[in-house]
């Protein structure tokens, strides 16, 4: 489904956000969690609005299940989300869906920002930090330090400590030079690599991903408990 036109005046690379939104929401009971409300607004609208407001984002592509085309289209119209260019059908896996989204980006797109549609509280600072690093280095992703002690487990027993200073939790948007991440995903899918995220495909292709500042509030809503936490974060911002 085609929407508005790109705004004029951009002097930097054209930047397109790709939002995979075709998941099954099994851990939320099977109901499409992106249509659930957070502070009386659908989760997907919160996510899209963050990229709509960001001056560094020119275009948005939503990757969805075919049965969600109509409700997603209606939300874009209702909330005036003018940067959404297309809603395209997802593939059999998340990697296939992301690849379809990248291939659907407008001509001339230089950087893609791949973001979990279920991370509705992403800030402008997190988006811009990752995008700017990707422009400079080719690939970047926001991270946050681990708060808990981390252990290695083997056969149900703790076998080693892992220094927290050497690890971090990665978030999205994960941002890349478009042609590199497209090629990296194609290669990873051909080799049937077990990918944990898009950074893994980029790294497997021999590229480096630079770490940028994430935000603990940029959580992914996966379970009902996450929705409660997100509501609390929103109330904290408002109060």
Image (cartoon, helix red, strand yellow):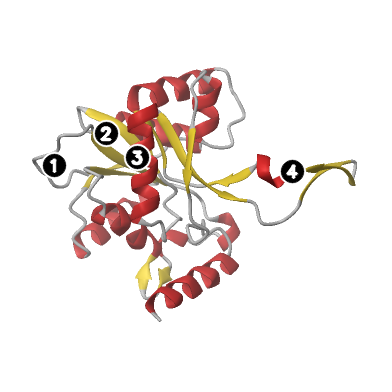
Q: Nearer the viewer, residue 207 or 23?
A: 207
Label 1 sits on a secondary structure element that is loop
Distance between the alpha carbons at the discs numbered 4 and 1 = 46 Å
In primary-sequence order, the first of circles 4 and 1 is 1
Distance between the alpha carbons at the discs numbered 1 and 2 = 12 Å
Q: Do labels 3 and 1 touch, CB within 8 Å?
A: no
Q: Which residue is mark 1?
A: 6
Distance between the alpha carbons at the discs numbered 3 and 1 = 18 Å
Label 2 sits on a secondary structure element that is loop
How many C-alpha atoms fall within 10 Å of the one at disc 1: few (<14), some, or many (≥20)?
some
Q: Which residue is mark 2?
A: 105
> Relative to residue 145, is residue 176 drawn left or right?
left
Q: Nearer the viewer, mark 1 or mark 2?
A: 1
In primary-sequence order, the first of circles 2 and 3 is 2
Res. 63 in view? no
Q: Nearer the viewer, mark 2 or mark 3?
A: 3
In primary-sequence order, the first of circles 4 and 3 is 3
Label 4 sits on a secondary structure element that is loop
Disc number placed over residue 131 in the picture, else none: 3
Disc number placed over residue 163 in the picture, else none: 4
In primary-sequence order, the first of circles 1 and 2 is 1
């Amino acid at each position: 489904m085609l929407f508005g036109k790109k705004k004029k005046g951009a002097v930097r690379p054209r930047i397109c956000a790709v939002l995979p939104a075709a998941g099954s929401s099994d851990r939320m009971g099977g109901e499409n969690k992106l249509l659930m409300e957070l502070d009386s607004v659908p989760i997907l609208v919160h996510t899209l609005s963050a990229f709509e407001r960001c001056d560094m984002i020119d275009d948005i592509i939503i990757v969805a299940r075919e049965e969600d085309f109509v409700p997603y289209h209606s939300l874009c119209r209702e909330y005036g989300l003018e940067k959404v260019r297309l809603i395209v059908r997802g593939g059999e896996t998340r990697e296939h869906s992301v690849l379809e989204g990248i291939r659907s980006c407008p001509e001339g797109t230089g950087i893609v920002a791949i973001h979990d549609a279920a991370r509705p509280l992403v800030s402008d600072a997190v988006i811009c930090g990752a995008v700017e690093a990707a422009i400079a280095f080719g690939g970047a992703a926001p991270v946050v330090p681990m708060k808990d002690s981390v252990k290695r487990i083997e056969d149900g027993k703790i076998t080693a400590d892992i220094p927290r200073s050497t690890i971090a939790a990665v978030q999205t948007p994960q941002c890349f030079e478009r042609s590199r991440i497209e090629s990296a995903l194609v290669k990873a899918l051909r080799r049937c690599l077990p990918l944990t995220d898009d950074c893994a495909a980029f790294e497997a292709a021999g590229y480096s991903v630079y770490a940028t500042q994430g935000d603990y509030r940029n959580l992914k809503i996966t379970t009902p408990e996450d929705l409660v936490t997100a509501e609390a974060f929103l109330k904290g911002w408002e109060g």
